Amino acid sequence: RDTCAVVVAGGSGERFGDPRGKQYVDLCGLPLACWSLIALDRSPSIGHIVVVCAADHRREMREDVISRLRLRCEVTIAEGGATRQDSVRSGLAAVPEDFGLVAIHDAARPLIQPVSVERAIACVRDDAGAGGAICAARVTDTLKLVEDASIVATPDRSFYWSAQTPQVFRTAQIVAAHKAAARDRYLGTDDASLIERSGARVVCVETPRDNLKVTLPEDLLIARALLQSRLA
Ligand code: CTP
Ligand code: MG
């Protein structure tokens, strides 16, 4: 067990719009955030979980999410920041020293499965030249580059993947990348982009598209249907 999971749940879920925050809405009988913790806990490489949440959600996260699950892994709570990137940096600071790898995961992706987590971890562990590995899916729509509502170009779709989480890195390398990004005031929308800018190679691990991020209310309906069919 060489990998620590960092689960970011420190967002306010503005686009989702539920006053409780989307982390805590019901998904098949459990608060949404429970499902990714269950999957990570069942991944054989994961030995510790850091959960990042807003300071005023600490009690809810501890009592309604973590404590009710009887996880095998020890869980540490870290305090969220203003941006996702700040939250990840805070979570990384709480990773115990003996974990050489970290798997950074959005709490808002409840449908992640242990097999996908393990594949991404193995990619980094088994390839000394890889700076990271991310779960990702090939895009299925035709993509348009648009400016002022007019199409500028239609890029070749076969080159495009959409990034998911978990994203797996060597702990020291991603900590350094976050430090450099903070210094340069670089704000990325994922963690891999912070490693990419250092010139290191990041690998994509093809992952089912059902590892969706619950962003809008309709995403919860899809997640519920998918999870129900999995549990049936
Ligand atoms: N996140 C976080 N800290 C933040 C912002 C986001 O830990 N300051 C987490 C979210 O809780 C979520 C993940 O990062 O699990 C992905 O972010 P996103 O889907 O954008 O969630 P929110 O930021 O909460 O939603 P919105 O952008 O609609 O406000
Ligand atoms: Mg957000």
Image (spheres, rainbow, N blue to C red):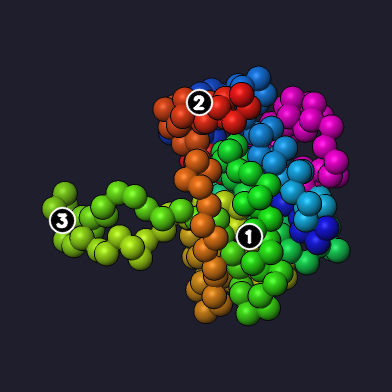
Q: In which quarter of the image is residue 156?
A: bottom left
- Earlier residue among tags 2 and 1: 1
Q: In which quarter of the image is the C terminus?
A: top right
Name the amino acid type tagged 2. Ala
- Residue at 13 percent across and 53 percent down: it is 150
- Residue furthest front as drawn: 232
Corner quadrant of residue 2: bottom right
Which residue position holds label 3? Answer: 151
Rendered position, 128 above or below 96: below
Mark 3: secondary structure: strand
Q: Which mark is residue 88?
A: none
Marker disc for residue 120? 1
Dot in front, 3 or 1: 1
Answer left or right for 143 relative to 104.
Answer: left
The answer to whether 164 appears left or right of 78 in the picture is left
- Point out the stretch of residues depicted in magenta: 49-78
Residue 82 horizontal/vertical position (percent): 56, 46
Query: Observer-nearest residue: 174 or 40?
Result: 40
Residue type, mark 3 in image: Ile
For this rendering, which residue is in front, 208 or 221?
208
Q: Quick check: is 113 in the magenta stretch?
A: no
Residue at 46% from the left image edge and 53% from the top image edge:
137
- Residue type of the residue flagged with mark 1: Ala
Q: Which residue is identified by label 2?
A: 225
Which residue is pictured at 53% across the width and 43% down the height?
211
Closer-to-camera residue (11/23): 23
* Quarter of the image where one finds residue 183: bottom right
Q: In the rendered structure, which disc, 3 or 1, sits on the residue that comes first in sequence?
A: 1
Which of discs 3 and 2 lies nearer the camera? The answer is: 2
The vertical placement of 77 against 218, above or below, is below
Disc 1 residue crowd, few under 14, some 14–19, many 20+, Cα 10 Å: many
